[in-house]
Amino acid sequence: MNIFIIGKIGSGKSTVAEMFSSFQDTLLIDADRIAREVLRMPEVQKDLLETFGELIMENDEIVPESLAEKAFADRESVEKLNAIMHPEILERIRATIDETRKNIIDIPLPGIGRDVIRPDVTIRVDCPDGIIKERCDQPEKLERQRFIDLPEKADYVIDNGEGMESTQEQVDRIWEQYEHRCLPGKF
């Protein structure tokens, strides 16, 4: 069972994913962590350097902020970044998936891999823009979202703008509803 947690930068996806991962028989898969690992791969670094230039490197390492500045400059650059990064990220997610558990996949880019890793359930985390701006310590990250198309449709939507207690109640309610609709051993 693959459960995608999607949402804007700063919406609280990771917090919600962690809440879901506290339930029995779950496995949290953090696509951001996997992306950071992929950035350290020599063949990926080579492709990124060829595409975005040497200014993204410092001390023989890709500097994520420098890469983001170049890669999120326009939609074409984002597509180039995705073509380099996504295949390896998806392969690592696929290798991590445990078919005997409920895989909670915290995935910042909702379109990534839907043709490779099919979500059984999609949960979108929403939060008012004002709260997102307060949470985000790097305003340039918010600007990057202009090239990310979040789907309007999700199986569930969590409003993460009313505080942690409200968010946890919504997570608990969704988990309980879905567990009761499924056969034993299935989410």
Image (spheres, rainbow, N blue to C red):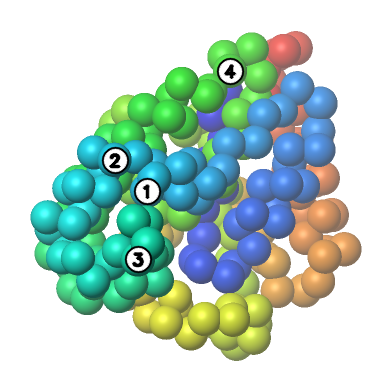
Question: Identity of the amino acid at label 1?
Answer: Leu
Q: CA distance from mark 2 to mark 4?
A: 27 Å
- Vertical arrangement, residue 107 with respect to residue 64, above or below: above
- Vertical arrangement, residue 35 with respect to residue 185, above or below: below
Res 144 seen here: yes
Residue holding disc 1: 39
Residue 98 in the image, given as x and y percentages of width and height: 58, 18
Which of label 3 and label 4 is nearer to you? 3
Q: Is residue 110 left or right of residue 103?
A: left
Could you tell me which residue is drawn at 23 percent across and 71 percent down?
55
Q: Which mark is residue 98?
A: 4
Could you tell me which residue is drawn at 84 percent across and 54 percent down?
169
**Residues at marks 4 and 1 touching, judged by CB atoms closer than 8 Å:** no
Residue holding disc 2: 42
Front position in the image: 152 or 73: 73
Name the image quarter holding residue 179: top right
Residue holding disc 3: 58
Question: Identity of the amino acid at label 3?
Answer: Glu
Q: Is residue 80 left or right of residue 41?
A: left
Which of label 4 and label 1 is nearer to you? 1
Could you tell me which residue is drawn at 48 percent across and 85 percent down?
139
Secondary structure category for the residue under label 1? helix
Question: Identity of the amino acid at label 2?
Answer: Pro
**Residues at marks 2 and 1 touching, judged by CB atoms closer than 8 Å:** no
Which of label 2 and label 4 is nearer to you? 2
